[in-house]
Image: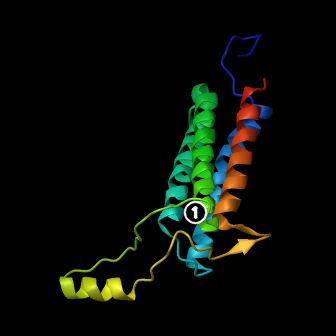
């Protein structure tokens, strides 16, 4: 609020604005990385990989709304941070499954579609079976799920910390 006029103003700088941009950029970047590794790099995602994407999509939407609704900026940024943290938590679970620390899904999943039963069977047989307990790619000893967990949880913490500062 502007002390002179009493009007509600949006701070264009400062910790909340940085939190707002992080809440948009981090999940957006992680989604682009996941989609790039899938469509350009040829890495097929498993079911838990898809689970990690949904909270990031929600975070991007919430952070985007925070730019359009200045009165709700802090609340929307906090919700985006929680969504990012949720993706990080799923990443921790997925990384644990990959390392064999605990059991993950007990059934395999694949996506196949067809107009009739013959086409569906043909598509099922041609669709690769992607296991959630197999690491397809790693860097510095961490899988994509583990990197998602590290980046997401660190970023969510930073966003929450920045959002509390005045």
Q: Quadrant of the C terminus?
A: top right
Residue drawn at (57%, 36%) of the image: 79
In the figure, 137 relative to 62: above or below? below
Residue drawn at (73%, 36%) of the image: 17
Along the line of sight, the residue nearer the viewer: 139 or 141: 141
Q: Position of residue 24 (x, y in %)?
A: 65, 48
Along the line of sight, the residue nearer the viewer: 66 or 155: 155
Q: Position of residue 85 (x, y in %)?
A: 62, 44
Q: Position of residue 120 (x, y in %)?
A: 26, 82
Residue 142: quadrant of the picture? bottom right
| Residue 139 appears in the picture as rendered | yes
Q: Secondary structure at mark 1?
A: helix
Along the line of sight, the residue nearer the viewer: 28 or 124: 124
Q: Quadrant of the N terminus?
A: top right
The answer to whether residue 157 is left or right of residue 136 is: right
Residue 12: quadrant of the picture? top right
The residue to which callout 1 is attached is: 97
């Amino acid at each position: 609020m502007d002390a002179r006029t009493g009007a509600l103003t949006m701070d264009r700088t400062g910790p909340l604005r940085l939190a707002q941009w992080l809440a948009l950029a981090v999940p957006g970047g992680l989604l682009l990385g996941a989609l790039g590794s899938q469509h350009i790099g040829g890495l097929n995602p498993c079911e838990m990989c898809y689970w990690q994407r949904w909270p990031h999509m929600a975070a991007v939407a919430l952070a985007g709304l925070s730019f359009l609704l200045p009165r709700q900026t802090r609340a929307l940024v906090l919700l985006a941070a929680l969504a990012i943290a949720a993706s990080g938590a799923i990443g921790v679970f997925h990384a644990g499954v990959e390392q064999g620390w605990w059991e993950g899904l007990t059934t395999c999943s694949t996506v196949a579609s067809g107009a009739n039963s013959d086409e569906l069977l043909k598509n099922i047989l041609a669709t690769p079976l992607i296991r959630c307990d197999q690491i397809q790619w790693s860097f510095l000893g961490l899988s994509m799920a583990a990197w998602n967990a590290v980046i997401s949880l660190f970023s969510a913490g930073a966003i929450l910390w920045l959002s509390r500062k005045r």
